Amino acid sequence: MISAPPDIFRVGINLPQVMDSPHGLIAFAVFASLSGLWLAKRFSVAKNIPGPPSASFFTGNLLQLVAPETGRDWQLNANKVHEGVARIRTLFGGSALLVNDPKALHHILVKDQDIFEEWPAFTATNALLFGDGLVATIGDQHKKQRKMLTPAFSIKHLRGMTPLFVSIARELEQHISSMVRTQPIEIDVTPWLNRFALEVIGKGGLGHSFGKLSQHNDFSAAAKDLAASVSVLVPGAPLTPWFKYLGPAQFRRFILKLIPWGLLQRLVDIVNIMDAEVHKIFAAQQKALDAGVSDEGEGKDIMGILPTDTTSGAIARLLHLLALNPDVQSHLRHEVVQAFHHQDEAIDFSNVSALPYLDAVVRETLRVYPPIPTIFRQALKDTVVPLLHPITGVDGEIMKEVYIEKGTDIFINILGSNHHPKTWGGDADEWKPERWLTDLPDSVLRNRELSGVYSHQMTFLAGKRACIGFNFSQLEMKVALAILIQSLEFSLPKDKEVGWNVGLLMTPVIRGSNSIHGQLPLVIKKLD
Ligand code: HEM
């Protein structure tokens, strides 16, 4: 088993600390010169658009944006103070736009989606880590791959997969129940939820089991560490498109192995573990196909999608909120027990999707706490983007639209969009499941600019690159909750405070542990 050196995931590995070590300093110098060239053209971007003051010439506002403990509030406030479009500072005086205005987002993600493409650093990083799958491609190649994958996420397909989801959730419940049978105990639920989500994607998507949920496996540990490792390396992301010019994959791996930086080495290990497992899966599938074994109904055509911990993070957030709000937890348990009477076979796609309170809890959780807070885009040419809510420029001019130069980086503020007070009202920041049980305000229902694929929110984004798995993930969350909540009660540990760190994904951590390694300790009691 390959495991991470203990201090790799400490919060302290951020840009300032990297610069404290000789290796970090050399890496930073290379990074700085390349990034300087890369950013030279960006000094003039959107000068009249107001934004927060730059915190540092070297890193602008980037370290505030991704600061583990405070980044979430910073992202929310930046768009509250500076309304729907804020100019933020990036590396070496460069600028980018942080956007949450509904009309601007509609243009960027839907209407003018061909002008705003994925960040090259994002697709390049995905290509380097996972190969040329959907998340690493753009343009026609992306369109083609997406068209091939879409049927695998249809409602018809998900209906067929529901019993499989139920049986995996039941396996999870049984393992947890066996640990808490005699008395309530504290359990870190993150590895369990991660193995659950992996098994759901493995069996549901690839027809492949990653092993028993009760057993540690390297792949699941690698998947769990992946987002944390990549998040810490985000400030170096502009370098990744250059990295492919270093030579073939074998050579690049050789070069990486020479760099004595624990975090990078862990990332190489993670990629190697995933690569080996994916090759095993391909070989097994090829064998099955050669033997004429049908894969119908198991959704093996979701091949190429890497399992992520977005959904396991969302389930963790749901359990944490239920532990924080025992009344909501009891109400939810009552609804689910009434509907299913502890009988797994009573659960199907339609009835688990239609439970009003379960649905409200899930929608509100995804709105207030989107697992991915920010997504990046880049303008491929000069363009003008209209605003729903005009802003006041630095020179006092009222701006109903913003001019965006070719090459401008756009930070889609998913979090800020879901909390927009002019859309969701003055209580937008509050977690209130009951908001979904009454009529939503006109500012939501009659707002044609709210183009998110899911429930008027940006959580799964909008347009041609919106999350293809959002129905899959809804089903997974609802089935897991419906099974766990019937027989288990979740409460908070007395001696630990859980916080959620910002990164590429939101990650639960124990406050004061100084680690970004995901942990969510909950006290779990078996109900009679
Ligand atoms: C709560 C859980 C999830 C959230 C919040 C989420 C969110 C997102 C977001 C925001 C994007 C857009 C990324 C971008 O444009 O750069 C995305 C893309 C994607 N998601 Fe999800 N996702 C979730 C679960 C899933 C699941 C369970 C699957 C697969 C089974 C999945 C598969 C994908 C794929 C393949 C893409 C790329 C789509 C494309 O480029 O066309 N997601 N997701």
Image (spheres, rainbow, N blue to C red):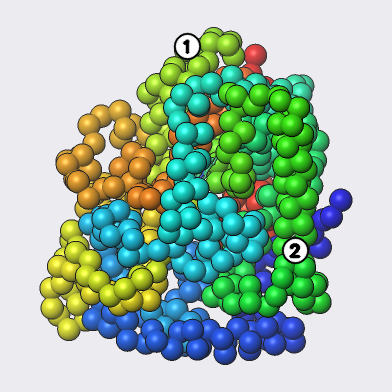
Q: Quadrant of residue 13?
A: bottom right
Left or right placement of residue 236 versus residue 405 in this view: right
Residue at 66%, 71% (x, y): give it: 12
Q: Quadrant of residue 200?
A: top right
Residue at 30%, 35% (x, y): give it: 435
Q: Give the mark, 2 or 1, whose residue is nearer the N terminus.
A: 2
Left or right placement of residue 329 versus residue 247 in this view: left
The residue that mark 1 highlights is: 338
Left or right placement of residue 52 versus residue 102 in this view: right
Picture coordinates of residue 160, whole percent (x, y): 53, 21
Residue 11, can we see it?
A: yes
| CA separation in Å, label 2 and label 1 | 48 Å
Q: Quadrant of residue 345?
A: top right
Answer above or below: position of 180 versus 81. above
Residue at 55%, 46% (x, y): give it: 310
Answer above or below: position of 409 versus 133. below
Front position in the image: 244 or 94: 244
Residue 415, can we see it?
A: no
Picture coordinates of residue 209, whole percent (x, y): 73, 33
Left or right placement of residue 297 versus residue 408 in this view: right
Residue type, label 2: Val
Picture coordinates of residue 294, whole percent (x, y): 66, 24
Residue at 54%, 75% (x, y): give it: 238
Residue type, label 1: Gln
Label 1 near ligand 1 (CB < 8 Å):
no
The residue that mark 2 highlights is: 268
